[in-house]
Image (spheres, rainbow, N blue to C red):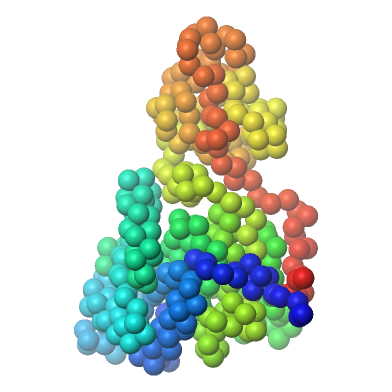
């Protein structure tokens, strides 16, 4: 029996797969939406669906679909013109996907989201619940950033990040980023003939992030840097990420099989939905600065933060707010939900547990309980050389 690729062995059976398709994989060289490419990608998604997988699509392309109808001769560059083009093109893009998926017997469902839908806990839960029902009822959700109102997405290509957020939210098994390159290289292959393709990344480190470059084509808004940033978020939440070239024939199925050139980034964590919201989306209300002993307890021993280790606080926060935690060198260690207000923490900072219990009888002494804590430290330097040279494992 031949060795299975990591992607194959990790994704046998019914799994949840999020596919993000970039503008460059949906358009003609002149920037207009390509109906042929939409049809091909829709049929590839249908192939995953028919194998029993839950499939979610995050798609770009609304601007490309809309700008010709507004009289523009090429993709506009100003934000208002992009927003107007997206307003026209969003429905047309959805119509294309719906038609081709319907031919395969699949119901398409559209969701337009913004960052606010993730930072507001109630809206985050509502989006999660809607996706859960759609998948359970056999629909294929098609999601895009709400381009008409979301300026930042138009400037920075946040559909990459959006796909990672969604993959984390639904606890997906795999996120496939379909773009105009077959993965990450040690340098920009368009400029350096000695650039080496990296088939597997064990963990995203600063060295890996430095290898990413800017946007690949003038029709797209995101480059490799946004994909690596998205992959970092997804892998922290326990989702494997594959970056592949949309121009390769039947690329989505071949990524699953491991039979096409791509970069696979392995997951190195796992988070409950509640902790994901806290780690990636929740607004923070202040900061707590702790000593070296408390840092060790929180980040190495997985213990709670007690008042004795707190040096000082910054900001004004209430009990149950999310705060950032720093060490005395200014390094952000992570974030957590506090059990005391800023005024109360200032009063008990540096105190032993027994003293705290006298001041606040009946209350638990932990300022941040270990179950309400997410560590954000960068991976150790030992990961720097963990770029394997083959994509297969036993």
Q: Is residue 206 above or below residue 390?
A: above
Please tell me in which quadrant of the rendered image residue 12 appears: bottom right
Tell me what residue is drawn at x 53 percent, y 72 percent.
Answer: 176
List x then y, in percent, for residue 309. 63, 23
Picture mark count: 0
Q: Nearer the viewer, residue 190 or 372?
A: 372
Tell me what residue is drawn at x 49 percent, y 66 percent.
Answer: 16
Tell me what residue is drawn at x 46 percent, y 44 percent.
Answer: 274
Q: What quarter of the picture does the C terminus occupy?
A: bottom right
Please tell me in which quadrant of the rendered image residue 148 appears: bottom left
> Is 151 displayed left or right of 26 in the figure?
left
Q: Is residue 89 above or below residue 306?
A: below
Please tell me in which quadrant of the rendered image residue 366 appears: top right
> Is 88 displayed left or right of 371 in the figure?
left
- Residue projecting furthest to the top: 358
Q: Is residue 82 above or below residue 124?
A: below
Q: Nearer the viewer, residue 251 or 340?
A: 251
> Is 45 displayed left or right of 94 in the figure?
right
List x then y, in percent, for residue 375. 60, 42
Q: Is residue 133 above or below residue 352?
A: below
Residue 286 seen anywhere in this rendered image of the structure: yes
């Amino acid at each position: 029996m031949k060795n299975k690729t990591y992607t194959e062995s990790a994704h046998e059976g019914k799994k949840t797969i999020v596919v993000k398709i970039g503008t460059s994989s949906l358009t003609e060289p002149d920037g207009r939406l390509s109906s042929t490419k939409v049809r091909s990608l829709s049929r590839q998604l249908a192939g995953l669906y028919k194998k029993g997988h839950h499939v979610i699509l995050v798609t770009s392309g609304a601007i490309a679909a809309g700008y010709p109808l507004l009289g523009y001769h090429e993709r506009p560059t100003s934000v208002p013109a992009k927003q107007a083009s997206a307003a026209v093109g969003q429905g047309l893009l959805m119509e294309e996907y719906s038609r081709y998926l319907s031919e395969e017997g699949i119901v398409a469902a559209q969701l337009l989201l913004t960052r606010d839908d993730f930072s507001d806990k109630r809206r985050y839960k509502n989006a999660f619940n809607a996706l859960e029902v759609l998948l359970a009822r056999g629909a294929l959700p098609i999601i895009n950033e709400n381009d008409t109102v979301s300026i930042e997405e138009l400037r920075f290509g946040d559909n990459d990040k959006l796909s990672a957020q969604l993959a984390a939210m639904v606890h997906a098994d795999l996120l496939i980023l379909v773009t105009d390159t077959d993965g990450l290289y040690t340098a920009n292959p368009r400029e350096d003939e000695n650039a080496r393709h990296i088939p597997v990344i064990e963990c995203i480190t600063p060295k890996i992030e430095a290898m990413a470059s800017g946007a690949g084509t003038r029709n797209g808004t995101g480059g490799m840097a946004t994909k690596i940033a998205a992959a970092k978020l997804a892998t922290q939440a326990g989702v494997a990420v594959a970056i592949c070239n949309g121009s390769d024939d039947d690329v989505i199925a071949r990524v699953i099989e491991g039979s096409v050139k791509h970069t696979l980034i392995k997951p190195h964590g796992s988070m409950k939905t509640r902790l994901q919201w806290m780690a990636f989306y929740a607004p923070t209300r202040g900061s707590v600065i702790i000593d070296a002993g408390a840092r060790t307890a929180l980040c190495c021993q997985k213990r709670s933060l007690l008042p004795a280790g707190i040096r000082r606080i910054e900001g004004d926060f209430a009990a149950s707010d999310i705060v950032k935690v720093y060490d005395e060198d200014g390094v952000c260690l992570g974030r957590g939900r506090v059990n005391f207000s800023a005024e109360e923490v200032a009063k008990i900072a540096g105190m032993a547990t027994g003293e705290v219990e006298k001041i606040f009888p009946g209350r638990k002494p932990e300022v941040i309980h270990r179950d309400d804590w997410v560590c954000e430290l960068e991976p150790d330097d030992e990961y720097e050389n963990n770029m394997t040279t083959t994509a297969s494992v036993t």
